[in-house]
Image: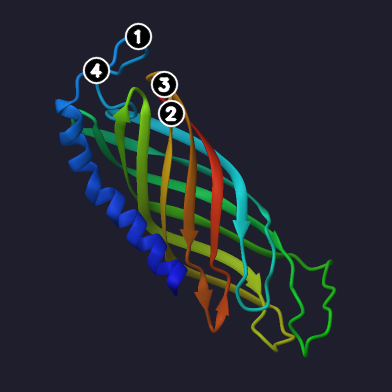
Amino acid sequence: MKKTLFAVALASATLCALPAFAQDSQTAPPAGGNFQPSQPIGSGNWFINGSVGQAHMRVGPYDDHPTTYALNGGYRWKVGPDLGLGVEVGYNDLGNFRLKNAFNSNDVNLTSQRQALRGWTAGVNGKINVWRGLYLSGRTGVYGWRGHGYANQDINRHHLDKVDWYAGVGTGYDFSEHFGLGLSYDYYRAAKDHIKLSSDTASLTAEYRF
């Protein structure tokens, strides 16, 4: 619950703070020498980004850090001199994860069965250029997921699907009007029938803008 509230609060605070950052950046004189955008980078553009990272799953009978992948795209509007707000859709693979000692404190070996979490995302995002290509970002929306899992003390493997939510924040650097790299933290809520597959991820993201 603490992690859930933290992720939502962080994403909401970032999105709410973006206009304030944009207003402050209007009064700051430009620092010469390096690339300086004439508008918010990634604002007023279609975009696509890909991410690779690591999940942290330590809920219920799970204890693992699988590799994650995500592909995301959408459109971001320019709504201020340094601010962009947009919509996005995407797909992610939050990895295959293993069980820890779950059943009567005995080791469990289910390597032949994949405990997986996959899903589609749809939501909104915001991005603010704070200084010479350096940016902060936030995102949140709905998460339609499918997964396989176990509840504590339950030897039956369940196939699950549901629509939940996600939220995240990030920072990075735009090298040009078309390309940027960043780091992000995202939380994906996935829980049903007393089985919790919720994960938080840390990822490296590359974005291309058309």
- Whether tag 1 and tag 2 are in contact, CB under 8 A, the answer is no
Q: Amino acid at mark 3?
A: His
Please tell me whether mark 1 or mark 3 is closer to you in this view: 1
Q: Secondary structure at mark 3?
A: loop
Earlier residue among tags 2 and 3: 2
Element at label 1: loop
Label 3, label 4: how many angstroms apart (C-alpha)?
21 Å
**Quick one: label 3, few (<14), some, or many (20+) residues within 10 Å?**
some
Q: Which residue is mark 4?
A: 30
| Residue at image mark 2 | 173
Q: Which of pointers 2 and 4 indicates the residue nearer the eye?
A: 4
Query: Distance from label 1 to label 4 (Cα)?
Result: 9 Å
Q: Residues within 10 Å of mark 4 (few under 14, many from 20)?
A: few
Mark 3 or mark 4, which is nearer to you? Answer: 4
2 and 4 marks in contact (CB < 8 Å): no
Residues under numbered marks 1 and 3 in contact, where contact means CB atoms less than 8 Å apart: no
How far apart are the two marked residues, 1 and 3, measured between alpha carbons?
19 Å
Q: Which mark is first along the chain, 4 or 2?
A: 4
Q: Residues within 10 Å of mark 2 (few under 14, many from 20)?
A: some
Task: Name the residue rendered at 74%, 65% in the picture.
Answer: 114
Residue 33: give its label: 1
State which tag comes first along the sequence, 1 or 3: 1
- Picture coordinates of residue 112, whole percent (x, y): 84, 67
Q: How many marks?
A: 4
Q: Residue at x 36, y 54 (%)?
A: 140
Mark closer to the chain start, 1 or 2: 1
**Label placed on residue 178:** 3
